[in-house]
Image (tube, rainbow, N blue to C red):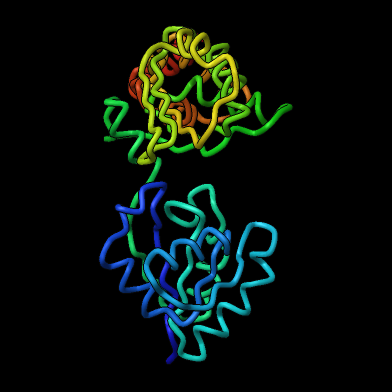
Amino acid sequence: MPGGRLIVCATPIGNLGDISERLREVLASADIVFAEDTRRTAKLLSHLVIGVGVISLFSGNEQSRIEQVIEAVRSGKTVVLVSDAGMPTISDPGAAVIRAVRESGHGVIVVPGPSAVTTALALSGFGGDRFVFEGFLPRRGRERAERLQAIAREPRVVVLFASPNRLPGDLADLTAVCGADREVAVARELTKLHEESWVGPLGAAVERWKDPVKGEVTLVLGPGEEEIPSLDDAIEEARSLVGQGVSVSDAAREVSGGGGVSRRAVYEALLEDQESS
């Protein structure tokens, strides 16, 4: 299907010196820019001395903008999608638009760039071979409690965003479920003039940040201790499944599916139960 293209662009997370030549070229060639915050994007374009129309596309109107984006691409225009900072779709709008453009038969190109997630991850020194990104914690209630419990059980490095006003509460709640000794990196105002990074135990972080702060904050939790499954517990769980009518083979496969427990060992224990009964 002939037409234009949608280009998803990462923009600086603070320091305009991080603008790449490719981003500059793409913005200069754009027919339309859809932006999470038109005022912030206008400042970026002014800095680059680029004159192009900017249309708002934020979480509250993303669905209603989809057809407008598709129509612009279909008509042959180069359409650029940006968020306030960093990559669209990473705790920012854009995913629904990207899916819709693809489903309409048009291609999507991504221009990579600065990311608070990977920048904070590198600063932490915790390693990035295996990590998860949780975005912002839910504000309250059961959803928040469940997310905190999941993070406490997570053996991989965890990256989160924290709003300036909620930082003290987020650190306190993370300490309550993860323990005061779990390491955390607190990165504030990344790439900006007043950039600050700190690494230490959660308990000390709570003491250091008792009050709200200014600027954007990214938290990186060090890896938790992965629980080693108990063979005895796995066998008991498998016995319960067999008692419910599950076959010995299926029960052994079910309880060993998460790894860490030998399927053969569980299977043989179940066979011994049958032989002794």
Say which quadrant the N terminus sits in: bottom left
Q: Residue at x 60, y 65 (%)?
A: 57
How many discs appear?
0
> Whole-percent x and y of residue 198?
37, 20
Q: Residue at x 46, y 86 (%)?
A: 77
> Whole-percent x and y of residue 212?
59, 24
The answer to which image quadrant residue 49 occupies is bottom left
In the image, residue 203 above or below residue 143 = above
Q: Residue at x 64, y 57 (%)?
A: 59
In the image, residue 86 above or below residue 149 = below
Q: Is residue 1 visible?
A: no
The answer to which image quadrant residue 258 occupies is top left
> Whole-percent x and y of residue 134?
50, 36
Q: Is residue 15 visible?
A: yes
> Whole-percent x and y of residue 255?
46, 25
Name of the residue lying farthest toward the right: 141
Q: Residue at x 33, y 33 (%)?
A: 121
In screen coordinates, is 221 left or right of 35? left
In screen coordinates, is 245 left or right of 85? right
234 and 129: which is toward the camera: 129
In the image, residue 227 above or below residue 119 = above
